[in-house]
Image: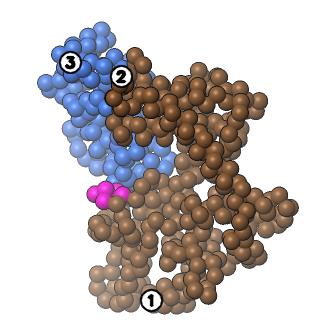
Amino acid sequence: MSRLIKEYKTINAQDDILLFPETADNLNNWTAMITGPPNTPYEGHDFKLYISIPDAYPNSPPMVKFHREAMPHVNVNYETGEICLDILKGEWSPVYNLLYTVQSIERLLSEPNADSPLNLELGILMREGDKTAYDSLVRYYLQRQK
Amino acid sequence: MECSICIEPIIIKSSTQEKDQIYDTVGELLPCHHKFHSDCIRKWHSFATDLKCPICRTVSLSMSLIYNYKMWYEKRVDIDLNKGFLVGNIIEYDNMMTSTRETEPDALVAHVVMTEDITNESPVLSRMFQTILNIDDMNDDDSEKDVEEEEGILDSLREEHNTLLCRICGDDTVENNGDADHRCYNCNARYHESCLHSTASEIGESDTWQQCIECRSLTQRIKGNRRFRIVNNTNTDELDKIRSTKRKIQEHVRKILKQYYGTGSSVHLTGEQFTKINQTVSRSLYSMSRNEYQTKIDYDYQAKQKVLHELHKLGYTSV
């Protein structure tokens, strides 16, 4: 647990990062806010991430989810918010930390990966290489939520 | 210097003036030379599914343990990483398989005709390893059936997982020296007595030769060494049975999966995807079968359902 306290101190010292424990006395559940990257259909939207820390952390990766039915993305299960990202599974390394994890998810928004779709609708569009349709569908989803 | 795993400093000896300071034991991975607290990196190895360096992902071939003692002396001891890191891994894997099985969609398991509740069965691999981990508890229990079972377990362990190998020399026997029958009661590492002696004298602390090189707890010779004499026993029924079950199940899976691979198929799987689906489906069927080929299971049907499920995940919704 002392490693989490260290991470907490480092993150707290930076003021441009929206990553914080849900309550100050419990470092097992964190929330993060990420901003839709420019030049993507996510631009202008903010997304909330729910992070829960397993007991074995950092030997086990943190569990990260979007809010349910909030993130239309080929690597995110729209219904549950579950994220398919290699470093959250088999490619996790104990030298990664929460900040790196959140930044990787932010990067996933601008670099969707067709090889591991959790959103079949978007996966098919992407596989067919129809970026315009992909982006439009994402925008439609986001618009509908407002 | 800081350990990247726990983000704590690594305290090493920097001058001969320092006294009464406790120094950390450093694990240096080779060939990449990245250093960690030895405890941190060994713990990671028990979680990891491979032997890649956490920092640079170079596959580690061995690790040097670097001790820093009060004397001027620093000695490196090479440890072969491939020996003995499997126990934790196997148990973890088994637990994972159990929990995956429990959360599988009902539709997939609904067709299995089973009289017993499969989720109540403790995972076989874990059970095997628990047995080995609690080996001295079993010394009280000498019923024939158990002995037979243990023999199979030990043989298969030795053969498939190398867990009884000495963590210093990485071998299971030394000329005229017998089995690695010194065991650390804290972390279950195995050692040859002679290896412990020579390591201790190399690092200049011959009076603490009985300490486990990994966790520094006391090692002890395993008493009533019957279980190490049965190693050459030919009774490997249990293992043969498990293997033949595995083989039979894999034949079913390959047969189904081949329909979706190569030219003439509407699905374009890469070799990697093929292997992965093959593994996932085989494992799932395997755990469903409880290590025994079940005549009540329609394997072709099950394999097909599971293969389709995996293909759907990859975006092939029309197959």
Q: Which amino acid type is shown beneath numbered disc 2?
A: Ser
CB within 8 Å, label 3 to label 2:
no
Q: Is B53 a magenta residue?
A: yes
Question: Going by the picture, which residue comes out furthest to the top?
Answer: A144
Please report the bounds of the magenta region as a residue range. Answer: B52-58
Q: Which chain is brown?
A: B
Q: Which amino acid type is shown beneath numbered disc 3?
A: Asp
Between B258 and B292, which is closer to the camera in this rendering?
A: B258
Tell me, for residue B202, which label it has, or none.
1
Tell me, for residue A84, which label it has, or none.
none
Question: Going by the picture, which residue comes out furthest to the front?
Answer: B264
Separation of disc 3 and disc 2 at Cα? Answer: 20 Å
Q: Residue, x 77% and y 30% (percent of image)?
A: B115
Q: How is the image coloured?
A: by chain
Name the residue beneath numbered marker 3. A130
Foreground label between 3 and 2: 2
Q: Chain of mark 1?
A: B
CB within 8 Å, label 1 to label 2:
no
